[in-house]
Amino acid sequence: MLTTPTINMTATGANIKSLIKTRGFKVADVQNILGFNTPQAIFKWMRGDAMPSIDNMVILAHLLDVTIDEIIIVD
């Protein structure tokens, strides 16, 4: 039987948080680069409450110098 992979949102959020910190960025830096008025979306990503849109994921991967596959944690 074929199993369908699912995104582990909590682990992905923790990974986004770790990558941002490891690369020396602050949430405000990411907010400004993505053109957000507030950092709320980024905090939602880091908590695993939401996922970045595909467009934002591409920018985030470029910013953090990783592939999208290195950001997303799949179960």
Image (tube, rainbow, N blue to C red):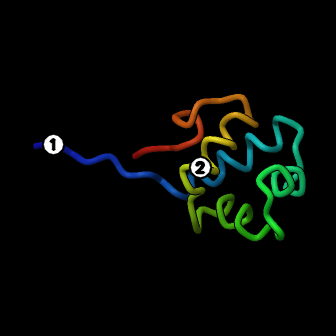
- Report which quarter residue 39 is drawn in: bottom right
Amino acid type at circle 2 is Asp
Q: How many marks?
A: 2
According to the picture, the residue beneath numbered tag 1 turns out to be 2
Local SS, label 1: loop
Q: What percent of the width, then of the height, locates residue 50?
A: 57, 65
Q: Which residue is mark 2?
A: 55
Badge 1 amino acid: Leu
x, y percent for residue 60? 69, 43
Determine the residue positioned at 75% across, 37% down: 63
Residue at 82% over, 57% down: 31
Return the x and y of residue 28 as percentages of the image width and height. 89, 57
Picture quarter containing residue 62?
top right
The mark found on residue 69 in the picture is: none
At numbered mark 2, what does the secondary structure look like: helix, strand or loop? helix
Residue mark closest to the camera, 2 vs 1: 2
